[in-house]
Image (cartoon, rainbow, N blue to C red):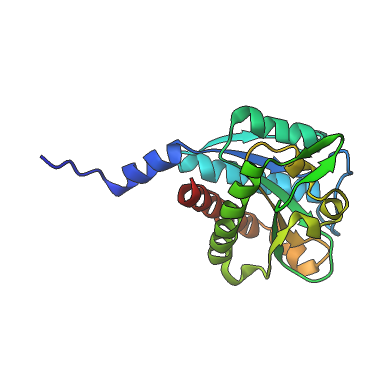
Amino acid sequence: MKIFVPVFLFLSCLCSAQTVCIDPGHPSEVGRGTQGKHITEIKAVWQVAVKLKKELEMRGVKVVMTKSKEEELVKNKDRSATANKAHVDLMVRLHCDDAAGTGYAIYYPDQKGTAQGKTGPSDDVLKACGKIAPVFHEEFKKAIGDELHDNGLLSDTKTAVGGKYGALIGSIFSEVPVVLIEMCRLNNPKDEAYISSEKGQNALAKALAEATIRSIRETK
């Protein structure tokens, strides 16, 4: 006798095996991040992180957070330790940029770096990131649509910290796949207005959830 499982139950089973770490950026040892005219990076990424957590949990994903409150100072090494300890399928790091222009960019480690006496990530993590990051970027771009400009999928080395150490510190200490998204250019008035709004934050959270689940499912 054939047993038919409803699609929503099947998808729920797929998601239930997933564990994700959400890392709302800053404050950390590298500073408090950037600031727009009306909102700080700390507040913007925290608000999106809370919404993303809810979106993922609604889809059956287990979520761990690197911070328990908005202003909690956590070093990047310790942020990675939270993800490592939980053996997550993906660590998603949320930030806002202050570069010229507009839109988002997604970063991942494609080589080892060295910082604070540690060289990493491992070859296995680099390989996993190389598979996950393109899918994450593709799905996020699809889900967010024309709401924000896509500045591409880039190496950690294209960031100031990553260029200095060979990879972002959070990547160097990570023992699990990791991606970082600069969700917008906070010094751009249009971008700031978008991420400050309930509509923009909800759209970002949903797009991030879709990108997270698909990238894990298709590369696991």
Left or right of 213 in this view: 178:
right
Q: Quadrant of residue 78?
A: top right
The one of 5 and 126 positioned closer to us in this rendering = 126
Q: How many marks?
A: 0
Left or right of 82 in this view: 26:
right
Vertical side of 144 occupied by 176: above or below: above
Vertical side of 135 occupied by 68: above or below: above
The one of 33 and 151 positioned closer to us in this rendering = 151
**Residue 115 pos. (x, y %):** 85, 40
Q: Residue at x 44, y 36 (%)?
A: 16
Q: Is residue 84 visible?
A: yes
Vertical side of 159 occupied by 147: above or below: below
Residue that lies at the very extreme toward the top in this rendered image: 85
Q: Residue at x 62, y 42 (%)?
A: 124
The one of 65 and 198 positioned closer to us in this rendering = 65
Q: Residue at x 40, y 42 (%)?
A: 14
**Residue 138 pos. (x, y %):** 56, 63
**Residue 119 pos. (x, y %):** 79, 39
Q: Quadrant of residue 99?
A: bottom right
**Residue 190 pos. (x, y %):** 75, 69
The one of 132 and 16 positioned closer to us in this rendering = 132
Residue that lies at the very extreme toward the left in this rendered image: 1
Pick the quarter of the image with the N terminus: top left
Q: Is residue 91 visible?
A: no
